[in-house]
Image: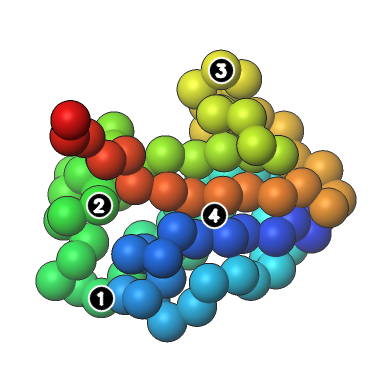
């Protein structure tokens, strides 16, 4: 099982009370499940779809600085030492 570092953007880390943490996980989906369970109940529907527990489209995941949407999405393979960054898409002008 690969050991990866998960790093959260500040708005997310404030809500779940950690910024960086190492996890031994088999998949990105397992990380999503951990994040879903870690968020306070009142915030889960803000960041996750209520039926599937999948992250909403504005919750972005970067594996080794590359958007997972440009890879295999949540099926992207993990390796020891990978860095997974989770951010919130911001709009404005």
Quarter holding the N terminus is: bottom right
Q: Which mark is residue 47?
A: 2
Q: Measuring 42% from the left and 82% from the top, which residue is drawn there?
A: 17
Number of other residues with Cα within 10 Å of mark 3, as a class: few under 14, some 14 to 19, many 20 or more: few
Q: Quadrant of residue 42?
A: bottom left
Q: Secondary structure at mark 4?
A: helix
Q: Is residue 61 above or below residue 36?
A: above
* Upstream in sequence: badge 3 or badge 2: 2
Q: Which residue is mark 4?
A: 31
Q: Position of residue 46 (x, y in %)?
A: 17, 55
Task: Pick out the residue farthest to the top.
Answer: 70
Q: Which residue is mark 1?
A: 40
Mark 3–mark 2 CB contact (< 8 Å):
no
Q: Position of residue 9 (x, y in %)?
A: 45, 59
Q: Secondary structure at mark 2?
A: helix
Q: Disc 4 vs disc 2: which is toward the camera?
A: 2
Q: Is residue 62 left or right of residue 3?
A: left
Q: Quadrant of residue 65?
A: top right
What is the number of callouts on the image?
4
Mark 1–mark 4 CB contact (< 8 Å):
no
Q: Disc 1 vs disc 3: which is toward the camera?
A: 3
Q: Secondary structure at mark 1?
A: loop
Q: Which residue is mark 3?
A: 70
Q: CA distance from mark 4 to mark 2?
A: 14 Å
Quarter holding the C terminus is: top left
Number of other residues with Cα within 10 Å of mark 4, as a class: few under 14, some 14 to 19, many 20 or more: some
Mark 4–mark 2 CB contact (< 8 Å):
no
């Amino acid at each position: 099982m690969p050991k990866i570092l998960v790093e959260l953007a500040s708005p997310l880390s404030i809500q779940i009370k950690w910024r960086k943490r190492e996890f031994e996980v088999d998949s990105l989906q397992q990380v999503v499940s951990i994040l879903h369970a870690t968020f306070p109940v009142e915030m889960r529907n803000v960041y996750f779809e209520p039926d599937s527990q999948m992250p909403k489209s504005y919750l972005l995941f970067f594996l080794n600085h590359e958007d997972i949407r440009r890879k295999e999405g949540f099926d992207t393979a993990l390796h020891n030492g990978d860095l997974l960054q989770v951010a919130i898409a911001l709009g404005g002008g």
